Amino acid sequence: MDGYIEYENELDNEALPYGASDTKVFKEAICDCPVCKDAGRNGQIYESEKNYYCSNARDDKGCDFLLYKNNISKLIRRDIRRDEVRDLCEDGSFRATCTKINDDTKTYEGIFSLKPMGKYLGLKLSFPD
């Protein structure tokens, strides 16, 4: 993972949600949780090996923010990065170059934003004008 020095900022995995016991988890918060912010709570978004999640996910507040890094990997041909999650939470969206699934030579610009899907959140793809 880019930007990390030998897992210097590790936390005990038992204290954080969604992390398997052998998963490295980092204690530096990426940004404020947009779901908690809308509900008047103070949640922070953290990163585990496979996803991004809210610090309130395990307590009685029960925040449902969970975004898998490979959520849109078929479209953008890579995992979602920390800076994109920060943009998503702070600005409501992030831009990424997408590749057609059946044709790697054709690319287009996509804008991804959070989309409520019942109890959970998904990503909505739209196109710039």
Image (spheres, rainbow, N blue to C red):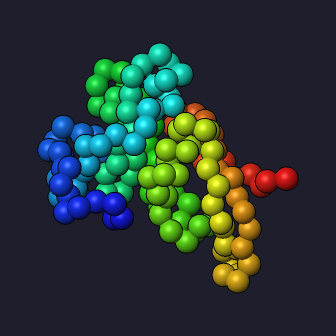
Q: Is residue 109 left or right of residue 48?
A: right
Is 120 located above or below residue 108 in the figure?
Answer: above
Picture residue at 49% right of the left edge, 23% below the top: 37
Q: Image height check: is 95 above or below 53?
A: below
Q: In the picture provided, is 42 more to the left or to the right than 20?
A: right
Residue 6: give x, y in percent of width and height: 19, 63
Q: Nearer the viewer, residue 23 or 84?
A: 84
- How far across and how far down the image is residue 96, in percent? 63, 60
Q: Position of residue 40 (x, y in %)?
A: 47, 16
> Of residues 86 and 125, which is closer to you in this image?
86
Residue nearest the viewer, comparing 2 with 98: 2
**Residue at the extreme right of the image, as rendered:** 129
Q: Residue at x 70, y 83 (%)?
A: 105
Residue at (79% x, 53% y) in the render: 128
Closer to us: 83 or 35: 83
The image quadrant that residue 101 belongs to is: bottom right
Residue 105 visible within the image: yes
The reply to whether residue 53 is visible in this rendering is no
Residue 60 screen position, x and y as percent? 31, 20
As drawn, 17 above or below 21: above
User: Residue 22 appears in which quarter of the rendering?
Assistant: bottom left
